[in-house]
Image (tube, rainbow, N blue to C red):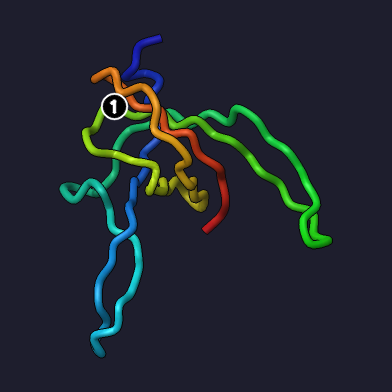
């Protein structure tokens, strides 16, 4: 299957952004990596593993996801990816072959 056919989801990639509020206090938020157009790019999203665990007497679930995008320079693991109500925290950026990047992530909800 071609790369174009596999990249069938529109996602927003964000990085941490520091700024200041009206009182001059430092704030942290998120800013889109892609600033032109609608700020989205095409991606393939595949869940590759999942596990359930008990933490602080509450059952939780963790899903590891591989997100494939076309190559973009200067991406690091300090990112998150938004798709619908899902938020993917990027743990590692793999495959800097000049063609694609794989963003190894864990999934949560907005």
Give neighbour class at mark 1: few <14, some 14-19, many 20+ (Cα, 10 Å): some
Quadrant of the rendering where the N terminus is positioned: top left
Residue at 57 percent across and 51 percent down: it is 108
How many numbered marks, from 0 up? 1
Q: Is residue 95 left or right of residue 19?
A: right
Quadrant position of residue 18: bottom left
Q: Nearer the viewer, residue 60 or 92?
A: 92
Residue at 29 percent across and 62 percent down: it is 17
* Residue 74 higher or lower than 102, as above or below: below
Q: Residue furthest top?
A: 1
* Residue 64 higher or lower than 2, as above or below: below
* Residue 8 is at least partly visible in this image: no
Q: Residue 28 placed where, x, y %?
A: 35, 69
* Residue 59 higher or lower than 74, as above or below: below
Q: Residue 62 placed where, x, y %?
A: 66, 44
Q: Is residue 68 left or right of residue 105?
A: left
Label 1 secondary element: strand
Q: Residue furthest left?
A: 36
Q: Is residue 99 left or right of residue 2?
A: left
Q: Residue furthest right?
A: 57
Residue at 79 percent across and 62 percent down: it is 56
Q: Nearer the viewer, residue 36 or 105?
A: 105
Quadrant position of residue 10: top left
Q: Residue 27 placed where, x, y %?
A: 33, 74
Residue at 76 percent across and 43 percent down: it is 52
**What residue did someone put label 1 on?**
70
Q: Is residue 103 left or right of residue 65?
A: left
* Residue 52 is at least partly visible in this image: yes
């Amino acid at each position: 299957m071609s790369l174009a056919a596999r990249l069938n989801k529109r996602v927003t990639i964000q990085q941490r952004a520091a700024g200041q509020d009206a009182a001059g206090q430092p704030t942290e938020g998120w800013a889109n990596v892609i600033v032109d157009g609608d700020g989205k790019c095409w991606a393939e999203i595949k869940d590759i593993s999942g596990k359930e665990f008990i933490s602080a007497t509450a059952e939780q679930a963790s899903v590891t996801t591989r997100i494939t995008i076309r190559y973009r320079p200067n991406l690091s693991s300090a990112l998150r990816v938004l798709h619908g109500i899902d938020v993917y925290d990027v743990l590692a950026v793999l495959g800097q072959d000049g063609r694609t990047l794989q963003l190894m992530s864990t999934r949560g909800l907005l």
